[in-house]
Amino acid sequence: MDQPRSALTQHADVAAPSLRQAPGASVVVAARRDVRLDLFRGLALWLIFLDHIPSNAVSWVTIRNYGFSDATEIFVFISGYTAAFVYGRAMRERGFVLATARVLRRAWQIYAAHIFLFMIYMAEIAYVAGSFDNPLYAEEMGILDFLKQPDVTLVQALMLKFKPAGMDVLPLYIILLVEFPPLLWLLLRLPVLALAASVALYALSWQFDWNMPAYPSGQWTFNPFAWQLIFVFGAWCALGGSDRLAPLIRSPAVQGLAVAYLLFAFLITLTWYFPRYGHYVPRWLADFMYPIDKVNLDPLRFAHFLALAVLTVRFVPHDWPPLKSRLLWPLVLCGRHSLEVFCLGVFLAFAGHFFLVEVSDRLSAQILVSALGIAAMIATAWLLSWYKSAEGRASGSGPKQPDADLAGGEA
Amino acid sequence: MRTLLPALAGLFACAGATLAQAGNCMDATALVHADAGVPRAAAAIASRHELRVAVAGSTSSTLAGQGGTRAAYPVTLQSALSERLPGVGVSVVNTAKPRQTAADMQAGFGQLLAEQKPALVIWQTGTADAMRGIDLDQFRAALEKGIEQLRADGADVVLMNMQYSPRTEFMIAVDNYAEMMRGVALREEVPLFDRLAVMKEWNDEGTFDLSATTKNSEMAEQVHGCIGRLLAYLVVEAVDFAKEAKQGK
């Protein structure tokens, strides 16, 4: 385990020089990367993987079953935070144009990764189309019809309009990054205005039903006009916002409110799984709450995420001793290589489902598939860390720039 | 491998045949529960001793070929209801058409009501909407509008959601739509036949191996037979629920 540890300290060394603030900058950038970000992003990646395997009993452990929000909120928030952390520094030190180029290169990488996953998906679909037949599912087999017109399907996929189930987070991420440079410019100068603009866009998208069109019908399952709120909020926190919020987060009233809200959300969630208790929810409350809109980042979901974040910051300080422990290291490692591990997770979810259908779908098989998948994610993250640090040493110069693709610096 | 595979397949087929007895599929009644009544259907039974049922749905309410007329669930629903409601003239008409979304079906309800004059409509929906990725708000609006329209013209509704289909599960994201249907059923006080949960239970319990590949429609017919009987159980529960509610007043 020495290898990854040295990557961590190495990174801390790299980050240290940037403590010097660029002259004239009005915003303080958090100087050192927060290990908690990697930890919780790693956790979000594991949970997303578990949730993506259909009918997986192990996904009972994931947070979506205990409240309104799920791992997606965590993932998008931390992605916004790290994007601002990495590219904010780049923009200040190297200028707008270069930072923009870096952000767009990252968006391009994610686009390529998405298309790669789409190919894997197509291969699995084509296999099912060729091998599966059952008169009971005449209707469901109609989903394979799009294989008959690849000209339309492939073009729609390249345009990010055709997005198979479980493949909708990366397109959201691509859009968020493409619009990020001008937003970051504003965040570095007038952070409050940038945040206000984000809230306004969120409100407008609710008011006027703005969303991106999808193929064959409908709209994006993660509406970028709404979900940008949590990304921008993450970015704002990274650029000094979290310091401003600190007194608020520490106040007992806010913490009490967070606990109460989490408890409320938990009790409401229970009624989804035990519908017989559903009538304990008063009519007016049900009318007010439902439906809880995931597509448009329902305020109830956002509030649930905020409550979780408040308590997390309270109980997991940045110098929390277990952050250095070997037990949590696999999570940190995965969070550090989030794009690769995310893509692997989507692929593993396909493969895991395939195994469950073809070989066995017993509970033991579900546990095995979940455990093996997470082990594969850890192994891959470890390999990537090893490769990057080995290559960094081989070139003799070591990592000079806090580049977005370096271990620990990935947005 | 060539000799081994058919041998294995034969073994699994034997095991499957013993497991796939339609008998224990009724264990899933634990998942079938009327949380709301069907007062219009109950009134028709009480006053006219008849129950006219219409099934509105898509392809999964039908079976291809002979099985369609013999074993599709609307057929078994009629016989099971007749058995459970002695002295009541039960008729079930199946109006399911392929690829119909909730909105498509809702648009046809005017005609359905005029032609069939049902006291109860089994509304099987959600699959086509999930496959096409219909906007969830539109899906909900279609459900609410349809329920209102049917009730206004003297028909109660029982909602039925999607089939559990393990092989296509990762291609069709049905969960959000199923969730929406559960929510609408709760708010509108409509009984819901949770076909998704029932079939998942069968698959988990080994009652039916729903990921089996076959051209034979035997299992499909057994599944439909079970759905028809469980649905009859739900309808009778919902009728009783309505009666009790009336007496309660």
Image (tube, rainbow, N blue to C red):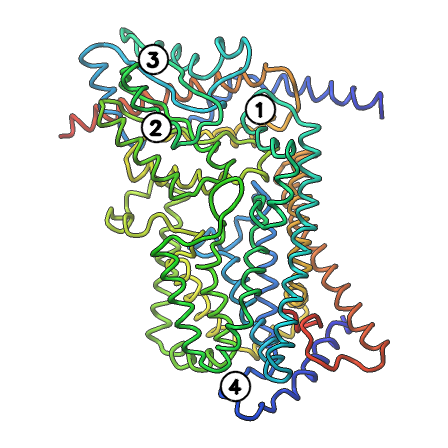
Crowding around mark 3 (Cα neighbors within 10 Å: few <14, some 14 to 19, many 20+) is: some
**Could you tell me how many numbered marks the image carries?**
4
Residue B71 in the figure: left or right of residue A387: left
**CA–CA distance in space, label 2 to label 1:** 35 Å
Both labels 1 and 3 in a single chain: yes
Residue annotated with mark 1: B208
Q: Which numbered marker is on residue A40? A: none
Q: Nearer the viewer, mark 1 or mark 4?
A: 4
Dot 2 or dot 1: first in sequence order is: 2
Q: Which numbered marker is on residue B107? A: 2
Question: Which chain does the residue under circle 2 lie in?
Answer: B
The residue tagged with tag 3: helix, strand or loop? helix
Residue annotated with mark 4: A28
Is the C-beta separation of discs 1 and 4 under 8 Å? no
Q: Out of A275 and B91, give the one closest to the viewer.
A: B91
Residue annotated with mark 3: B84
**CA–CA distance in space, label 1 to label 4:** 62 Å
